Amino acid sequence: MGGGRPLQGETREQLVRRLAEIPGAFSILAFVDNRPAGLANCFAGFSTFACRPLVNVHDLMVSAPFRGKGLAGRILAKVEEIARQRGCCKVTLEVLEGNEAAQHAYRRAGFAPYELDPAQGRALFWEKKL
């Protein structure tokens, strides 16, 4: 759902090597009957509010034939297990507003929109492309 298109050329060729170079990054690969079924790419971060590390799930996907079987929840449970082992205060992720299926899976796994102060509303994820 992310970009809606497969990764292209140089990005596809270099991605695994470049991910391996990032300190604290990890990937979880899920297989069903020895067939690749899903993955999560995660990165270490730090919460200045909690003064503790955190894990950000940057990519989470389940291949179409395996959706609706709870695989996303099992992948997220493994991410949480690793985050707890690392002494993290939380796991973060982002989701597209229109991706209701993913939001449902994330809610089932205990995630909720980020909010520090209800009077200020929910946090928004912004970017500036470079």
Image (spheres, rainbow, N blue to C red):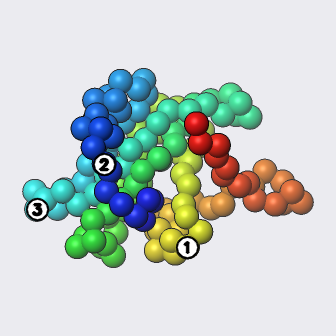
Q: Is residue 83 left or right of residue 34?
A: right
Mark 3 = which residue?
Answer: 33
Asked if 17 appears above or below 122 in the picture, the reply is above
- Between marks 2 and 1, how big is the CA–CA gap? 24 Å
Q: Amino acid at mark 3?
A: Asp
| Mark 1 surroundings: few (<14), some (14-19) or many (≥20) residues within 10 A | few
> Three-letter amino acid code at disc 2?
Gln
The residue indicated by pointer 1 is: 98
Left or right: 125 as drawn, with respect to 23: right
In-front residue for pair 73/29:
29
**Residue 26 location (% of width, % of height):** 36, 36
* Residue beneath disc 2: 8
**Image location of residue 45, percent across then percent down:** 56, 33
Image position, residue 63 (x, y; %): 27, 65
* Residue depicted at x 43% and y 41%: 42
Quarter location, residue 129: top right
